[in-house]
Amino acid sequence: MTKRSWRRRVLLPVVGILSLAVLVAGCGPDNSQNSLQPAGEEARKIDDLFMFVVVIAAFIGVFVVAGTVYAAIRFRARPGRDDRPKQTHGNTVLEVGWTLLPAVILAVVAVPTISLIFDLNEPKKPDAVEIIAVGKQWWWQFEYPAQDGEPRVITANELHVPVGREVFMKLRACDPSLPGECNVIHSFWVPELNGKRDVMPGRQNTLSFTAEKEGVYFGQCAEYCGLSHANMRFRVIVQSEDEYADWLASQREGPAVTLAEAGEAGNLFAAKYACTNCHTTEDSSLSVYGPNLTHLASRSVFASGYYKLTKANLVDWILNAPSMIPMESKECRLGLGVPGVTCVGMPSYVNDTPPGQPTMTRSEAVDIADYLLSLK
Amino acid sequence: MTTVEKAPPVSQREVGLLRRPRATTGFASWLTTVDHKKIGILYVCTALVFFVLGGVEALLIRLQLFGPNGTVLTAGQYNQMFTMHGTTMVFLVGMPIAIGLGNYFVPLQIGARDVAFPRINMFGYWVVLLGGIFMYSSFFLGGAPDGGWFGYTPLTSAPLDSGFLPGRGPDFWTMGLILLGVGSTTSAINFIVTCINMRCPGMSLLRMPVFTWMMLVIAFLTLFAIPPVTVALTMVFFDRNFGTLFFDPAAGGDPLLYQHLFWIFGHPEVYILILPGMGIVSETLPVFSRKPLFGYAIVVFSGIAIGFLGWGVWAHHMFVTGLGPVAISAFGLATMLIAIPTGVKIFNWLGTVWGGSVRLTTSMLFSLGFIAMFTIGGLSGVMHSVVPADTQQTDTYFVVAHFHYVLFGGLILALFAGFYYWYPKVFGRMLDERMGKLNFWTMFIGFNLTFAPMHFLGLWGQPRRTYRYDEGLGWETLNQLVTVGSFIIAFSVLVFIVNAVVSKSRGQVAGDDPWDGRTLEWSISSPPPEYNFAEVPEVHSRDDFWHRKYTEDDEGRLVPLPSGGAEAHAAAGHDGHGIHLPSPSYFPLVTALGLPILGYAAVFQNVWIALLGAVVLLYGIYAWAIEPAD
């Protein structure tokens, strides 16, 4: 191979593939969950630092890989070539040099790293919005604390925040409203707004982010938390200050339709199928075992945030939730707190019906769904 | 005891039911052998079986993730698969293969006739095999472990009826790992004593081959890393079964404590896995470049430095648990420090190849592939030490990509380099080089196709340990590519297995020294005689065997020495008659059998099984202790 053809046959494709890879890395899909497309101040700082390190690493990586390939080809044994190479045992200057060089490069990386660690850990700003997130199996509860005499707001799977203002998240696995109720470790992660932070049972971690643009950003639990970990998604809905204030005010209101007003559907929901054991539809300030449904119809997703809130989905869910989100809920209808009963999640109302309890028909589920979808 | 002491030396009394076995060939000999070479073969073959099992689990995972909302596995099955894949590859593949190769070659490289404790050596093997079988039996006894290979509390430690992880899987996991820890600890002690006490005359520590050095370093790491994880696993088991509250936050327990205990084991464990790989390529690169290792001393000391620093970085697995900025800064910096000795090693390996006469055998290709892929894995590791970046990457596919570049691109490629390099010594025949090249290139391409796209998937937001992903997230194409890549790797492993089986009977006869080797194992016949060395060698320099064959002229160029010199002396006819070797024994197997029985007793909380296990274990130990020497 001449020098020229070697360049064309080896070098060009390598450079081509590498630059293609970098291009792909730079763009990535517009999936609202892409850490390379930051839309929050914190995520942007992280991305800038990461890209700085990527450039250095790519340079070293190409150097070492190319050096390995070059050495293997350049020094390969060929017929007629002397196979009695010079026996070098080492070279102190070189070795000291390539001990110091990585140290210097690392120092260059370490300085902005440490400074960003402390930057991201700044205390809460005075005008920050404070929200409590409670990780449950397998969904997120968001609590907007009581303020100015107004009651708190409890919602699920969708986090509304104002644009341009710091949001200060208090992350909990033990629900303060339900003493003794501690969940497993989860991790709160919205890649386009900030890195992740674990939700540790028995501790309170915090995480702040400041969204730069209005829009919907996807989050997902990032710590393995059991059977349906994969389904534990949520959304952050970034709104203008006015829209956010309107939303919060509307969430504080009572239900659009009370259980009593709901008639037969209310009876199915509360009495016949005892949905009120775990859910409330009457008061958005209550934290109960299951998601607070007082304003369910104002949300776009439900069921761990994995499914769009449509009537068809909701009916399927009410009938047989475990077929949509795998859960350890086979025995849930036997009752909470009964010794030996394993119950995580929502039971099926068509399978595994305990003796003496009713099995749900589709028309009953449609009635309940209609009622829930009226809860704007 | 007194009866044994009084027993006449010729007609010793046999103790117990099982007479001291005599066979050195046949099936029974494999059950009772104490020959470090046979035990080494057992370790590697066993680990390869588990490698295939772990690989099948990986393929099922990849089939499930081929498209969005996959339905090949249920959520529960998927969680079992990734738990068992990780557990298998770390404890039943990575460690046993290294221990197996070390078993076979450490005594040969230091000129010893066996390891320091031959029966304990065999006991360690049985514990690993039976521990693996114990853990895999869970698939048929109510479900495999599904809490992840790291088993975070309180998910794993919550009582059974909490519903967090129903089934006996997590109990099999804790008991299984405790068992495997027993095996690893005995092996570690054995390696340490062997390396320190059994070296032949002249084999000073700084003349020891680098592979042996690295086995010594990981033996120390293993010895000190196993206790904390054993403590942690015991606490998990007690929390789950006996109502203790170590990790129950509602009662004041602390789940974070588990993470500290697990990772103070878990991070040294990473080096336990990778250092033997570094040792292997430090053997192959000089041989196939016909040059000594560039900067032997600094390579050895870098390995030791990595071992030491490995104890100070465990919390980099916990950067997002809320340890506070000071702690994570310190652990971030400590993690960066590890890059220095690692970088030094990489440059020294390149310096070894540079200016050499490079023979691109399959073993050398795997070694060069190791340098390149391990470097990439190291660089993505540095990205994790950049803590803010790590908060985006941890628990995503980026991390999966990173540690597979280190453990597959690093360890597995190095192990295959070792297989091609040492197979001729073990079986007396060469592995086929054409199949070898196919093996290398399919593995190299399949590996990169599988793990390179995962970097992007992670950055694009795909979390680990998720049994499905929704459509419309833009992850479909790369996930398909990954799945295709994983099947190319599977094909490559199949090629290797065929090669290994076929070459054993039909391969080209190797001769004693097919690669023009540098270390003592190449000075004896292939396969080596049972007693290894007819006469215990005496070495006068590093790479002593090489210096028996070559000297250097004034310019440092190689000059072959006339044959018939020193090496002919070593090979001089000696039938090994009269060399004392330890006798085979049943009792390592009997003793080891007691442990998984106790494991089943713990899992099913059955007193009768526990009694049976205790009887077997105690009988094994007793009979072992009073077994006559020969």
Image (cartoon, coloured by chain):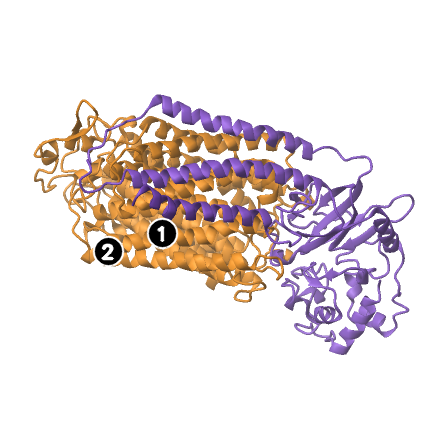
**Callout 1 amino acid:** Ala
Depth order, front residue of A245/B324? A245
The verdict on a common chain for dots 1 and 2 is yes
Q: Which residue is mark 1?
A: B47
Depth order, front residue of B2/A113? A113
Q: Chain of mark 1?
A: B
Give the quadrant of residue B330. Answer: top right
Left or right, A39 with respect to B533, comes to right
Q: Quadrant of the C terminus of chain B?
A: top left
Q: Nearer the viewer, mark 1 or mark 2?
A: 1
Q: Is residue A153 above or below residue B550?
A: below
Percent of width and height locating residue B217: 38, 33
The disc placed on residue A136 is none
Callout 2 secondary element: helix
**Residue drawn 55% across the image and 48% down it:** A23
Within-10-Å neighbours for mark 2: few <14, some 14–19, many 20+:
some
Left or right, A81 with respect to B167, comes to left
**Residue drawn 69% across the image and 59% down it:** A304
Is any part of residue B622 visible from this angle?
no
Give the color of chain A as drawn: purple
Callout 1 secondary element: helix
Q: Which residue is mark 2?
A: B28
Percent of width and height locating residue B186: 37, 41
Left or right, A311 with respect to B203, comes to right
Percent of width and height locating residue B296: 31, 28
Q: Is residue A37 above or below residue A367?
A: above
**Callout 2 amino acid:** Ala
* C-alpha gap between disc 1 and disc 2: 21 Å
Count numbered badges in the picture.
Answer: 2
**Residue drawn 26% across the image and 58% down it:** B501
Give the color of chain B as drawn: orange
Depth order, front residue of B444/B125? B444
